[in-house]
């Protein structure tokens, strides 16, 4: 199953000066069930050390993906990769990693999301739904855009960009499967509390719709 609450790392941004592995462990303990490691400034050996330190988290059920690095994803026993328009093609990643690998894709339009689904992605992230400090030049697209992009899409959608627990209800009601965040999770004063808040928001929305 595709995770419902993803934490996307982004180097030192969004960690509030804390060690990456500890931040991830605390978030997973609070309810985050998907991690995308976007650590472009770390060497391959450093990334493998991080992956190795997170294996207990994977064994407990959380999914761990690497951004772009197919070689390290396979060598380090990750669950898959998260790709983008300027990375390797989805079909090539599938051939390299095999049928069981989880492949995500960062999309920024309805057309791009549908193209990724047709190419074999297991899920897509759509952004920016709301404005975010990480990409100040890109205005938030809003829930109407998200709903349109989710329409007739055959793979789960994660909403990314300015996502908060308070906005989760509207996000899921627009057709998204889950949420993804950087600073709203990793920079929170109470890491477990932030993760619990997202998880509770999803569960509350699900119970209301049931």
Image (cartoon, rainbow, N blue to C red):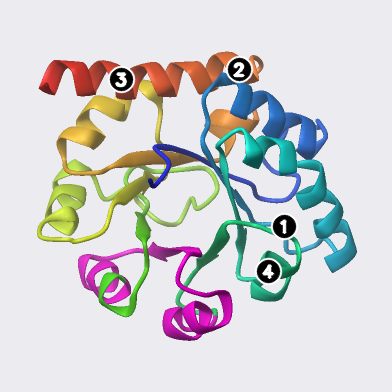
Callout 2 touching callout 3 (CB < 8 Å): no
Query: Can you give x and y, in whole percent of width and height, for residue 80 in the image?
Result: 56, 62
Label 1 – label 2 distance at C-alpha: 22 Å
Residue at 30% x, 20% y: name it: 203
Q: Which mark sits nearer the N-terminus, 1 or 2?
A: 1
Q: Which residue is mark 2?
A: 192
| Residue 96 on the magenta segment | yes
Left or right, 27 with respect to 2, comes to right
Question: Which of 10/81 is in front?
Answer: 81
Image quarter of residue 162: top left
SS for tag 3? helix
**Residue at 57% over, 30% down:** 185
Does residue 150 lie above or below 193 as drawn? below
Q: Earlier in the sequence, mark 3 or mark 4?
A: 4
Closer to the camera: disc 3 or disc 4?
4
The secondary element bearing badge 2 is classed as helix
Per the image, the residue denoted by label 4 is: 74
Element assignment for label 1: loop
Judge depth for marks 2 and 3 and give the one in front.
3
Q: Residue at x 11, y 21 (%)?
A: 210
């Amino acid at each position: 199953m595709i995770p419902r609450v993803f934490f996307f790392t982004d180097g030192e941004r969004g960690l509030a000066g804390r060690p990456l592995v500890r931040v991830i462990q605390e978030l997973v303990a609070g309810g985050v069930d998907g991690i995308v490691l976007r650590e472009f400034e770390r060497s391959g050996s450093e990334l493998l050390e991080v992956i190795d330190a997170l294996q207990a988290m994977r064994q407990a059920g959380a999914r761990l993906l690497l951004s772009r690095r197919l070689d390290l994803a396979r060598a380090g026993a990750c669950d898959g990769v998260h790709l983008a328009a300027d990375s390797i093609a989805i079909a090539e990643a599938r051939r390299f990693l095999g049928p069981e690998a989880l492949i995500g894709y960062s999309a920024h339009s309805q057309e791009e999301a549908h193209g990724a689904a047709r190419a074999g992605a297991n899920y897509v992230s759509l952004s920016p739904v709301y404005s975010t400090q990480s990409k100040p030049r890109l205005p938030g697209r809003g829930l109407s855009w998200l709903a349109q992009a989710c329409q007739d899409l055959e793979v789960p959608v994660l909403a990314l960009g300015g996502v908060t627990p308070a906005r989760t209800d509207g996000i899921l009601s627009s057709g998204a499967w889950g949420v993804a965040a950087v600073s709203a999770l990793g920079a929170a004063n109470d890491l477990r509390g932030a993760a619990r808040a997202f998880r509770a928001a999803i569960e509350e929305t699900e119970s209301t719709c049931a």
